[in-house]
């Protein structure tokens, strides 16, 4: 996922949050629809200041948010002291070393409060005494049975032993399950992002491309197809003359000279027809 939203992405998200179309935004701000479309698609990165003020007023956000100077839309003037962040925490958040966008999404996730509650219970030792008391009771019962009846290690004794709780192991599993639920939902939400990997589509495209290459005769033709793919040139639309010159130029590459021997025949240059004057 992208660490920071662009101005265009912010404008698009805000418009959708307000259930507005480009036409409606154009009517309310006086900004031409095509200009708004360019802003949202980042085709015009330098947003006019006047337009920026109108859009910020329409969406009720600070201009700093639209420009990416802050990630807060509604709490621009929030006092840091009210957030109870330590100096070290602020340094980490402002260092650019972590993905603050992902952290924000984690915090606002519905399951995050449950994760924090489980972490607090463990860290503050809220139930430590109860767990120790329960383990002591189970162990006492197990010891009493052994002393009185001297039984072999049967199911009853094994159950009394297995029922004792390892606090560290128990809460590690609980917290892990909390985090796993949140991460799965965030991953699903980001699977539609432009910046996220579309594994299925990529795998299909790669397979089709490899199949196409495998059916191409001649090493030079394969190199040209790879070259065209990298530069996004429509190979199928190239003329035989253009393919010929691409092959001739590629022969000057040091990579191809050190590679496998060239095979296959090259397309011949089309010959111009000579128009002979008829002798009278």
Image (tube, grey):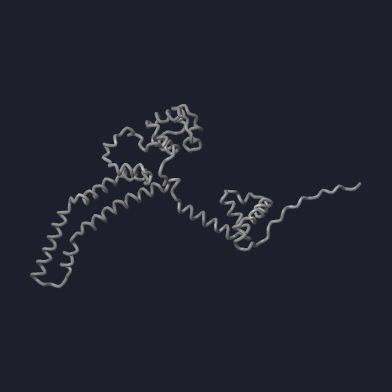
> x and y percent of residue 141 in the render?
11, 64
Q: Residue at x 34, y 50 (%)?
A: 183
In the image, 81 versus 246, the foreground residue is 81
Count of numbered labels shown in the rendering:
0
Q: On the rendered structure, is 136 left or right of 194?
A: left
Q: Residue at x 51, y 37 (%)?
A: 43
**Residue occupying the far left of the picture:** 148
In the image, 263 versus 96, the foreground residue is 96
**Residue occupying the far right of the picture:** 280
Q: On the rendered structure, is 212 left or right of 174?
A: right
Q: Residue at x 63, y 60 (%)?
A: 218
**On screen, residue 136 above or below 279:** below
> x and y percent of residue 85 in the render?
28, 41
Q: On the rendered structure, is 50 left or right of 139?
A: right
> x and y percent of residue 111 in the render?
29, 47
**On screen, residue 205 above or below 6:** below
């Amino acid at each position: 996922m992208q660490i920071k939203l662009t101005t265009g992405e912010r404008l698009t998200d805000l418009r959708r949050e307000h259930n507005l179309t480009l036409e409606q935004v154009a009517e309310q701000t006086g900004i031409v629809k095509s200009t708004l479309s360019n802003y949202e698609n980042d085709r015009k990165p330098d947003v006019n200041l006047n337009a920026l003020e109108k859009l910020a007023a329409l969406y009720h956000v600070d201009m700093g948010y639209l420009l990416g100077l802050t990630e807060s839309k509604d709490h621009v003037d929030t006092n840091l002291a009210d957030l109870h962040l330590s100096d070290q925490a602020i340094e980490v958040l402002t260092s650019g070393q972590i993905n603050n966008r992902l952290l924000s999404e984690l915090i606002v996730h519905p399951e995050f409060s449950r994760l924090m509650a489980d972490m607090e219970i463990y860290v503050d030792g809220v139930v430590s005494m109860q767990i120790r008391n329960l383990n002591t009771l189970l162990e006492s019962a197990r010891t009493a049975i052994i002393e009185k009846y001297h039984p072999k290690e049967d199911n009853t004794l094994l159950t009394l032993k297995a029922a004792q709780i390892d606090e560290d192991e128990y809460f590690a599993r609980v917290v892990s399950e909390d985090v796993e639920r949140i991460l799965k939902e965030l991953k699903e939400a980001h699977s539609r992002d432009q910046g996220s990997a579309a594994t299925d589509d990529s795998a299909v495209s790669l397979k089709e491309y490899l199949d196409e290459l495998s059916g191409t005769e001649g090493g030079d033709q394969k190199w040209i197809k790879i070259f065209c793919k990298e530069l996004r040139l429509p190979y199928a639309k190239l003329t035989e003359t253009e393919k010929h010159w691409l092959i001739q130029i590629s022969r000057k590459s040091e990579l191809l000279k050190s590679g496998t021997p060239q095979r296959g025949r090259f397309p011949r240059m089309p010959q111009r027809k000579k128009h002979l004057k008829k002798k009278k």
